[in-house]
C-alpha cells in the first residue's frame, strides 16, 4: 500500500509499504479521509520526545474509512465488512485502574505494544491506504454522514472532552481561547452542552472565522483585549476553554474566570507556564487539563449528525496524499485561511 513514512524530523515521503493485517479484536480499514492535526505538524518537525514512538513511522489519527477485513472476534461485537467508521486514537488496555474507571485516555499501560495503542503516535496511523484499529477505537458513521465529517469527528470529540472537563452547564458564560479548529469546535461543543453565551478570543484573520460561526468575539492582539472581554462579561466567564495552552494564554484564562470558575486546557505547552496562584486561591478557581477523549466519540457523532456541532464548516482544504508536503505547509502557515486540511485518499 501507499503510506506517508516519517524517517526522522522533517524527513518524510510517500512510499510503498507492506499492507498491515488485523489481529484479534482488530479491523483493517480502507482509509478515505485524514485530517491534518496540529500535533501532526509538531510530530513531523520532531518537536516531541515521545512521538513518534519510533522511526520509520506512519502518523495520522483523524480519519474515516470503511472496514475491509475483520480480525478474530470482531464479528462477535457486531462489526461487518463494509461498515463505514471514524477512528479515534486511544485504545486503552481496559484492564488497569484508570481504564476500568472509564478514563482510558489515561491508561496506566500507555504505549505498551500489544496491550495499548495510541494510533498515529505509538502505533501506525492513517496516512495510508489501509490502517488497522482495535474495535474499541472505531465508531460507526450514521447513515448518510460523509467521510469528510467522519474525519473531523476526532478533533470535535477532543473539543467536547475539553468542554466536559470544564464542567460546562446549561446557561454558563463560556469563553474560548483560540479560534483554530479545536477552539472553534470547543465553542460549538460548549453551545451544544447548553452554554448561555460563548465568547471566543481570537486574533488576525481568525476574528472573521469566529464571526462566521456567530460567536461573540474579542481581539487578543490589542492591549485592550482583556478590557474588551470584561465589557462583554463583567463578572468573568464561568468556564474558560483554553485551546492554545501557551505561557501567555493560561494566565490570561485565569484572569478571565469568574469567581469560582473553572478553566479546562487542551493545548500542550512546549514552554514553562507561570500560574497566578493568588486569584486561584482567593477566588477558588479550578485549572484542569484535558487529554484526548474518554467516551466522547459517540456523542460527538450524534452532535455532528444533527448539526449541533458544525464540524464540516472548519474544513477548508483537500489534498491527495502525494501532496502531503504542501498540505502540511498550508496547515502550518494557515495559507488561504486554512483551518482543517484533509488528505483525500480517493483522489490520486
Ligand atoms: Zn488530532
Ligand atoms: Zn489501561
Image (cartoon, rainbow, N blue to C red):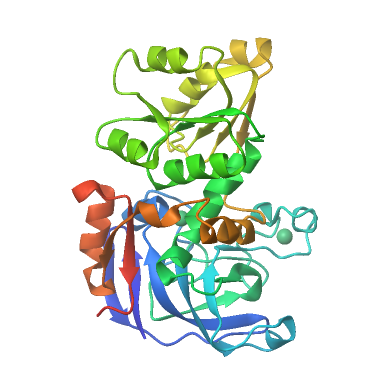
Q: Position of residue 135 (x, y in %)?
A: 64, 75
Q: Position of residue 228 (x, y in %)?
A: 38, 15
Q: Position of residue 63 (x, y in %)?
A: 45, 68
Query: Where ligand 2 lies, by quadrant?
Result: bottom right
Q: In the rendered image, which quarter contains the N terminus?
A: bottom left
Q: How many marks?
A: 0
**Residue drawn at 57 percent across, 44 percent down:** 192
Residue 46 visible to an observer of this rendering: no
Q: Is residue 263 above or below residue 55?
A: above
Q: Is residue 123 above or below residue 129?
A: above
**Residue drawn at 20 percent across, 61 percent down:** 326
Viewer-proximal residue, 8 or 156? 156
Q: Is residue 191 left or right of residue 313?
A: right
Viewer-proximal residue, 110 or 229? 229
**Residue drawn at 27 percent across, 78 percent down:** 347
Q: Is residue 206 left or right of residue 260?
A: left
Q: In the rendered image, which quarter contains the C terminus?
A: bottom left
Viewer-proximal residue, 59 or 146? 146
Q: Is residue 235 above or below residue 308?
A: above
The picture quadrant where one finds residue 78 is bottom right
Amino acid at each position: 500500500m501507499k503510506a506517508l513514512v516519517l524517517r526522522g524530523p522533517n524527513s518524510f515521503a510517500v512510499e510503498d509499504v507492506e499492507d498491515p493485517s488485523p489481529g484479534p479484536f482488530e479491523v483493517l480499514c480502507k482509509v478515505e479521509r485524514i485530517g491534518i492535526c496540529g500535533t501532526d505538524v509538531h510530530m513531523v518537525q520532531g518537536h516531541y520526545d515521545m512521538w513518534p514512538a519510533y522511526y520509520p513511522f506512519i502518523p495520522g489519527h483523524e480519519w474515516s474509512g470503511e472496514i475491509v477485513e475483520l480480525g478474530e472476534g470482531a464479528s462477535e461485537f457486531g462489526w461487518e465488512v463494509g461498515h463505514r467508521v471514524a477512528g479515534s486514537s486511544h485504545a486503552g488496555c481496559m484492564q488497569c485502574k484508570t481504564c476500568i474507571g472509564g478514563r482510558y485516555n489515561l491508561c496506566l499501560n500507555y504505549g505498551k505494544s500489544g496491550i495499548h495503542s495510541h494510533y498515529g503516535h505509538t502505533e501506525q496511523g492513517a496516512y495510508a491506504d489501509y490502517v488497522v484499529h482495535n474495535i474499541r477505537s472505531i465508531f460507526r458513521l450514521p447513515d448518510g454522514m460523509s467521510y469528510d465529517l467522519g474525519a473531523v469527528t476526532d478533533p470535535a470529540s477532543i473539543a467536547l472532552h475539553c468542554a466536559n472537563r470544564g464542567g460546562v452547564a446549561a446557561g454558563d458564560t463560556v469563553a474560548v481561547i483560540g479560534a483554530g479548529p479545536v477552539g472553534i469546535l470547543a465553542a460549538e461543543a460548549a453551545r451544544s452542552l447548553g452554554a448561555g453565551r460563548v465568547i471566543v478570543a481570537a486574533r488576525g484573520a481568525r476574528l472573521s472565522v469566529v464571526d462566521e460561526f456567530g460567536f461573540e468575539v474579542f481581539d487578543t492582539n490589542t492591549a485592550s483585549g482583556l478590557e474588551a472581554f470584561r465589557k462583554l462579561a463583567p463578572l468573568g466567564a464561568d468556564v474558560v476553554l483554553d485551546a492554545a495552552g501557551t505561557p501567555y494564554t493560561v494566565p490570561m484564562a485565569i484572569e478571565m474566570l469568574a469567581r469560582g470558575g473553572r478553566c479546562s486546557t487542551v493545548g500542550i505547552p512546549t514552554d514553562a507556564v507561570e500560574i497566578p496562584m493568588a486569584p486561584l486561591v482567593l477566588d477558588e478557581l479550578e485549572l484542569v487539563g484535558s487529554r484526548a477523549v474518554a467516551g466522547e466519540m459517540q456523542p460527538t457523532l450524534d452532535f455532528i449528525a444533527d448539526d449541533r456541532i458544525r464540524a464540516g464548516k472548519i474544513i477548508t482544504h483537500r489534498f491527495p496524499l502525494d501532496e502531503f508536503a504542501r498540505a502540511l505547509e498550508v496547515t502550518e502557515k494557515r495559507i488561504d485561511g486554512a483551518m482543517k486540511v484533509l488528505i483525500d485518499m480517493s483522489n490520486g
